Image: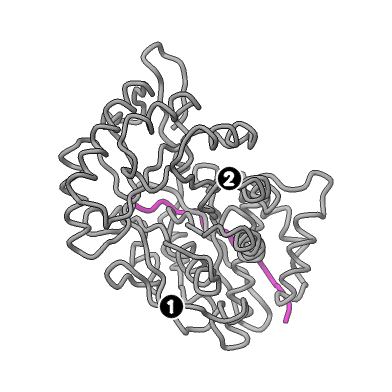
């Protein structure tokens, strides 16, 4: 079997952008993959254009060798754009190999260790009332873990104002009220999306009673592990870090130094299933569980389900489509075959490959426009993180 082509399909779904790829072979078997970098699809497509001539004619079943060739085959190794391209290709190769052997992808990873993959609800809110009301609906529907995504700064437009000190005062009050309302049985985390500084993070956590939060996700930027290590010493709430990491080496200091307690691995960013399994193994050796990042579309969901099925150290999979919020990123018109939620969990499929199909004809018909992420500014007009 030989690779004959790699096709790219950038699409706009539910007002956001996704980049899917199709790897074709001379055996008539094809595989689907996805990139995890939203808003920079043209850059990833450029990387795939570089990789295409290197891949045509190769055996798609030699996944590990292909990964090494793509990652190490240039002087300037790695980087998020290149690794997002490698991720998409790697996932597609697993899809091909699973289909060729007639087995689901998790069988290529050592077999499944669970029958279901449980999810946490990503709960976006902009007021205390919305937070508590939405949380109650989710809990009633059987969701045991809520990951809060505060959006109190939103003004209903592209550019909004965000003042960290104002935010932590408001959100600490709202989250404390939520914990009182729902009790102690529900797991609650919060994602501050690296919008805070070290002292702001400490102040935020100190404003809430012990036990309010079960973890905080990426409160500060991740470029300096040493800074996160110092922050780790100042607070007693577990961290969830890693959704932007693009290799096992980027995860390494956070795992070995016990900086993070949950690995927020994104199979479409980190280097595909090949690299994700290596990170999962490192995390297992340090008693760290996986809390996978999954904000894009069904191809990422399907690939992550197979990863989660094969790893003993898995906790919850991120889920955007919940009883209180459904952004439509899993549009059935684009994804006629995709994993289906059963309550708050996915049943691990026994279909060959990933168990996913994408409507390439619709993608070509609809076209694509690049979508930028929102921009936040402080009251003084200076730029800050979104």
Q: Quadrant of residue 339?
A: bottom left
SS at badge 1: loop
- The residue depicted at 22 percent of the width and 43 percent of the height is 178
SS at badge 2: helix
- The residue depicted at 45 percent of the width and 64 percent of the height is 301
Q: Is residue 166 visible?
A: yes
Compared to 81, does 90 lie above or below? below
Q: Please name the colour scheme applied to the rendered image.
A: one colour
Q: Quadrant of the N terminus?
A: bottom right
The magenta segment: 1-14
The percent position of residue 386, horizontal first and vertical second, equals 44, 32
The disc, 2 or 1, on the residue closer to the chain's N-terminal end is: 2
The percent position of residue 76, horizontal first and vertical second, equals 79, 44
Magenta segment's dominant SS is strand
Residue labelled with disc 2: 42
Q: Is residue 13 magenta?
A: yes
Give the foreground label among 2 and 1.
1
Q: Is residue 173 left or right of residue 345?
A: left
The percent position of residue 190, horizontal first and vertical second, equals 37, 43
Residue labelled with disc 1: 348
Compared to 162, does 295 lie above or below? below
- The residue depicted at 49 percent of the width and 45 percent of the height is 239
């Amino acid at each position: 079997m030989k690779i004959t082509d790699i096709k790219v399909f950038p699409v706009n779904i539910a007002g956001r952008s996704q980049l899917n790829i199709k790897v074709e072979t001379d055996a008539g078997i094809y595989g689907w993959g996805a990139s995890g970098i939203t808003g920079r699809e043209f850059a990833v497509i450029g990387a795939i254009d570089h990789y295409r001539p290197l891949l045509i004619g190769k055996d798609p079943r030699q996944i590990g060798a292909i990964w090494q060739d793509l990652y190490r085959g240039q002087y300037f190794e790695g980087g998020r754009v290149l690794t997002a391209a490698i991720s998409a290709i790697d996932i597609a190769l697993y899809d091909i190999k699973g289909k060729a052997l007639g087995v689901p992808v998790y069988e290529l990873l050592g077999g499944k260790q669970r029958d279901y993959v449980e999810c946490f609800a990503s709960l976006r809110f902009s007021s205390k009332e919305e937070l508590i009301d939405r949380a109650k609906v989710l809990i009633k529907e059987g969701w045991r873990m809520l990951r809060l995504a505060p959006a109190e700064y939103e003004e209903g437009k592209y550019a909004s104002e965000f003042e960290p000190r104002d935010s932590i005062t408001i959100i600490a009050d709202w989250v404390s009220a939520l914990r009182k309302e729902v009790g102690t049985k529900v797991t609650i985390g919060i994602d501050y999306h690296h919008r805070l500084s070290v002292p702001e993070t400490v102040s935020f956590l100190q404003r809430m009673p012990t036990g309010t939060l079960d973890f905080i996700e990426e409160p500060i930027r991740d470029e300096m592990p040493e800074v996160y290590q110092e922050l780790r010493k100042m607070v007693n709430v577990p961290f969830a870090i890693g959704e932007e990491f693009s290799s096992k080496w980027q995860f390494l200091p956070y795992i070995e130094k016990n900086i993070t307690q949950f690995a927020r691995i994104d199979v479409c960013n980190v280097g595909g299933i090949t690299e994700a399994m290596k990170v999962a193994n490192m995390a297992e050796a340090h008693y760290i569980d996986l809390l996978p990042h999954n904000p894009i579309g069904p191809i990422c969901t399907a690939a992550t389900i197979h990863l989660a099925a094969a790893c003993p150290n898995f906790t919850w999979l991120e889920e955007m489509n919940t009883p209180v919020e459904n952004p439509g990123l899993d549009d059935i018109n684009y994804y006629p075959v995709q994993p289906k939620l059963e309550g708050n969990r996915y049943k691990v499929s026994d279909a060959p490959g990933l168990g996913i199909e994408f409507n390439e004809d619709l993608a070509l018909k609809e076209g694509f426009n690049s979508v930028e992420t929102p921009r936040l500014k402080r009251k003084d007009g200076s730029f800050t993180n979104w």
